[in-house]
Amino acid sequence: MLRRVSPALPGAGRLTLPGGWAYTQSGGIRAICRTGVFREDLMILIGGCQSPFVRRVAISLRLLDIPFDHKPLRASTEPEKVRAYNPLGRIPALELDDGFVLIDSAAILDYLDEVAGPQKALVPPSGPARREVLRAVMLAAGAMEKMIAAFVESRIRPEETRHRPLLDRFIGQALAGFDALEAAAGDGWLCCGRLTQADVTVVAALGFLRQIEPQAAPDGRFPRLEALARRAEALPAFAQSRP
Ligand SMILES: N[C@@H](CCC(=O)N[C@@H](CS)C(=O)NCC(=O)O)C(=O)O
């Protein structure tokens, strides 16, 4: 099987081969390639971490110690390549080692938790803790969707057709989500006294908000969430998953 390899794969040994391609025999796990050790059994994350939906998946893979290869495709500039994985042309997608492609970050995160098992899963398996985490996750993911809508309205749509009230509505909805999260936040991780998917998605969402609408979220607008983001972004799983 031929696959291009990621420059960031863990593993021993480094040899130089032209093109970054490696050939592995069926059933083989490793082949030495240009940038490191290629593992045939690795999942492949499709999509660049400029997308907060991709970023929350990349962070989760790293927090759960699940090794993966990465194809940082952009949905806007490489739609054909993205459609090869997801007919909807959206990122993220996750190609599993048997070739099955999971689409949508929610379905991917659900699968990663299944792989990790209930002890390590980033969403608790049941009960009030699960509901609490999912509420925060949905507020943050919903805010991400509204920010994407705002991005399309303010940057992609032809200028003469842009509608300011609609843009304000989208930004207002996103900010309302963050306000609810800020009101529920304390000094530590958001839920359960440990790092969960709530923290991952909120931090990815806040980073995206401050990137695309910095004037809507100046320093101090969400003090507890900003402190949470500072703490989380210092962790390798978050730092290594920056755009
Ligand atoms: N609900 C999806 C949303 C994914 C999404 O909106 N991805 C954007 C990038 S941030 C995308 O691929 N947009 C391209 C398009 O919709 O044409 C998920 O959670 O994965």
Image: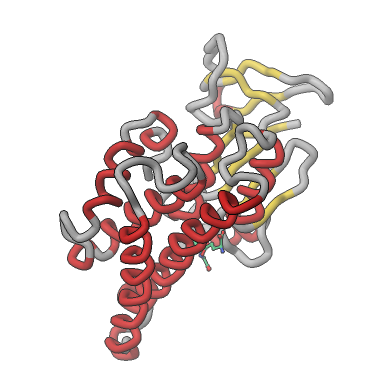
Give the image location of residue 216, x and y in percent: 22, 67
Residue reaching furthest to the right = 26
* 241 to 91, vertically: above or below: above
Give the image location of residue 235, x and y in percent: 37, 31
Question: What colour scheme has been applied to the protein in the rendered image?
Answer: secondary structure
Residue at x 34% of width, y 53% of height: 185
Going by the image, does 1 lie left or right of 148?
A: right
Residue nearest the viewer, comparing 97 with 166? 166
* 150 to 183, vertically: above or below: below
Give the image location of residue 201, x and y in percent: 45, 51
Residue nearest the viewer, comparing 199 with 94? 199
Residue nearest the viewer, comparing 157 with 141? 141
Residue at x 67% of width, y 24% of height: 39
**In the rendered view of the protein, which quadrant contains the N terminus?**
top right
Question: For residue 233, which quarter of the picture?
Answer: top left
Residue nearest the viewer, comparing 38 with 216? 216
Give the image location of residue 98, x and y in percent: 80, 39
Residue at x 38% of width, y 45% of height: 243
Residue reaching furthest to the top = 13
Residue at x 34% of width, y 63% of height: 178
Residue reaching furthest to the front = 128
Going by the image, does 83 lie left or right of 14?
A: right
Count the labels in the image. Answer: 0
Can residue 48 be seen? no
Can residue 124 be seen? yes
Going by the image, does 198 lie left or right of 160?
A: right
Question: For residue 86, which quarter of the picture?
Answer: bottom right
